[in-house]
Image (cartoon, rainbow, N blue to C red):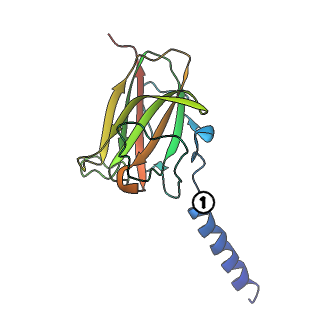
């Protein structure tokens, strides 16, 4: 009986540390690869920027300059020439998660030399952003940086549709 109390305390502490740990994709070099981005969507609440830290990458033009950007990163290899990206947080219609005022940027290049080619930021408190970008080079790797205005943190749903424009 005396052994159970310290064991239970240890388990609780390990669980608490795991919850507070940084997301695996906290930095560009550890971006989560999205293997098939033809009409792909994550599950609601699947991703989070909880416990994430700001990146060393400069903010793109659509991110507010005076705000902390607690971001997480994703990557995909272009299978087509255009992309539609959306991030859904705490919307009242189609809940994607708990994130308020999401924003994202799309980058070409590699993690040491990124060029922003698309960007969207929720300045209207819709808790949802969506935008199109292109042209993309088929076979090239692209990076998606997801965060939120006002340093908000939470869970979200990410959708990426890589397609050829008509």
**13 left or right, relative to 50:** right
- Seen at 53% across and 53% down, the residue is 53
Q: Count all numbered tags in the image, as a single digit.
A: 1
Residue at the extreme front of the image, as rendered: 66
Residue 87, visible in the rendered structure:
yes
Residue 123 position, x and y percent, is 26, 46
In depth, the one of 68 and 78 nearer the eye is 68
The image quarter in which residue 5 lies: bottom right
- Seen at 33% across and 53% down, the residue is 100
**110 left or right, relative to 162:** right
Residue 30 position, x and y percent, is 62, 41
**Circle 1 Cα neighbour tier, 10 Å, few/some/many (<14 / 14–19 / ≥20):** few
The residue that disc 1 covers is 21
**159 left or right, relative to 36:** left
Residue at the extreme bottom of the image, as rendered: 2
Residue 39, visible in the rendered structure:
no
Residue 72 position, x and y percent, is 51, 45
Label 1 sits on a secondary structure element that is loop
The image quarter in which residue 60 lies: top left
Residue at the extreme right of the image, as rendered: 3
Please state, as top left, top right, bottom left or bottom right, where the C terminus lies in the image: top left
- Seen at 58% across and 56% down, the residue is 22
54 to 12, vertically: above or below: above
- Seen at 64% across and 73% down, the residue is 13
Please state, as top left, top right, bottom left or bottom right, where the N terminus lies in the image: bottom right
């Amino acid at each position: 009986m005396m052994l159970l109390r310290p064991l239970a305390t240890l388990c609780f502490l390990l669980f608490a540390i795991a919850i507070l740990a940084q997301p695996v994709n906290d930095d560009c070099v550890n971006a989560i690869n999205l293997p098939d981005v033809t009409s792909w969507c994550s599950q609601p609440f699947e991703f989070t920027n909880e416990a994430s830290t700001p990146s060393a990458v400069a903010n793109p033009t659509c991110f507010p300059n005076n705000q902390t950007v607690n971001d997480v990163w994703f990557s995909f290899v272009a299978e087509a020439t255009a992309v539609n990206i959306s991030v859904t947080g705490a919307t009242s219609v189609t809940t994607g998660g708990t994130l308020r005022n999401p924003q994202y940027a799309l980058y070409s290049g590699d993690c040491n030399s990124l060029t922003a080619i698309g960007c969207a930021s929720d300045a209207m408190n819709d808790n949802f952003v969506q935008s199109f970008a292109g042209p993309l080079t088929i076979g090239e790797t692209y990076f998606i940086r997801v965060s939120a205005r006002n340093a908000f943190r939470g869970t979200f749903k990410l959708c990426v549709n890589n397609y050829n424009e008509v």
